[in-house]
Amino acid sequence: MPTKSLASPARKRQFGSERSTTPLPIVHDRPSDSKITWGRLAILVTVLAWLTYLVYTIMREFLNNGTQSFRFTTEAISYLVVVTFLTFSALMYLVARQGALQRFRDHVRVPRAELDSHFGAQQRSMTVLVPSYSEEPAVVRATLWSAALQEYPALRVVLLLGDPPHPTDAVVAERLAYSRGIAQQIEAALAEPRVRFSDELLICELELAADPAVSVEAVRELAGHYSWAAGWLDRMKAAEKVTDHVDTFFVEQVLGGLSAELALTATALNAAADENTAPTKERMLELHRRLVWTFSAELDTFERKLYASL
């Protein structure tokens, strides 16, 4: 599998940038009942504070100084409008926040098995566009790999190169030439697992069509495929050059995270085989498809500036 062949200096960390490479959670934390209650109370206090200001400040001034000049009246009304808009802005934030908290509280993530069942019947294609303009090849490569390893039935990743197609600087030309070939390098690297898992899916479909009963041997074989996929990612992870936080995130979260998920599935399958149990026919096909979909992305590159007009 290819590694970064074009050396580039370590990217300088920007002042104030985060040091943690742990991504945000997929699902927002469930807010507590007290947090939602305090949010409602904040909305009520905001409205009451505005009404209090209106009654005890503005209206009292008018009642106590009814004979004041036109200037006083204009200034009072203008000040009331300003305070009202500021209060309304704060109120809209609190209302939006309260709605978000209630959605976070009521949200339930769709189970993995239900997603697998859905995509087993609805295998639509999706194209991921990755725009790039004078980006470092290492960043482009990590981005394309991250997109290509996403699990989806029919995934196509296209690198949109916006660089000038005929640079005069030798260094820029070398980097552009490398960026042009990244998509083909990744697709070539994915060829081995793609062919392996596609063939295994076909064999599984034929076997289950002849005999719907899932054997323990088939479960262990599937576990071996998941272990092989995890090992493939681990070997790629070990071959990566880590020079900064971007490389660390790619190695730990993209490659390492996917490898850990596949290894966990292999462990669960082996545990099921040890107890002489097996998934259903449909679940076996879903697990085979997961391997195929994870390593079967198509990649391409498009340079719009090579054309005078689109």
Image (cartoon, grey):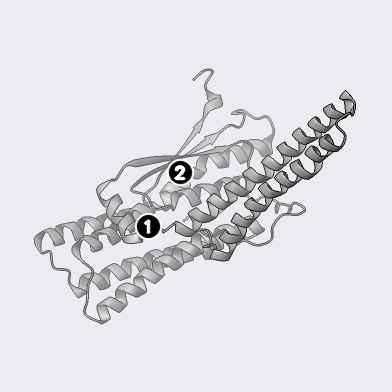
Which residue appears at 75% of the width and 41% of the height? 54
Label 1 SS: loop
Q: Amino acid at mark 1?
A: Val
Label 2 SS: helix
In-image side of 29 versus 149 (left or right) = right
Q: Residue furthest left?
A: 210
Against 289, residue 63 (above or below) is above
Residue 260 place in picture, x, y as percent: 45, 68
Badge 1, how many Cα within 10 Å: few under 14, some, many 20+? few
Q: Nearer the viewer, residue 62 or 72?
A: 62
Q: Residue furthest top?
A: 309
In-image side of 248 versus 301 (left or right) = right
Badge 2, how many Cα within 10 Å: few under 14, some, many 20+? some
Q: Nearer the viewer, residue 31 or 212?
A: 31
Which of labels 1 and 2 is toward the front?
1
Q: Amino acid at mark 2?
A: Gln
Q: Is residue 143 visible?
A: yes
Residue 203 place in picture, x, y as percent: 19, 59
Which residue appears at 12% of the width and 64% of the height? 212
Q: Which residue is mark 1?
A: 110
> Marks 1/2: CA distance?
35 Å
In-image side of 4 versus 9 (left or right) = left
Q: Which residue is mark 2?
A: 184
Residue 114 occupies quadrant: bottom left
Residue 295 occupies quadrant: bottom left
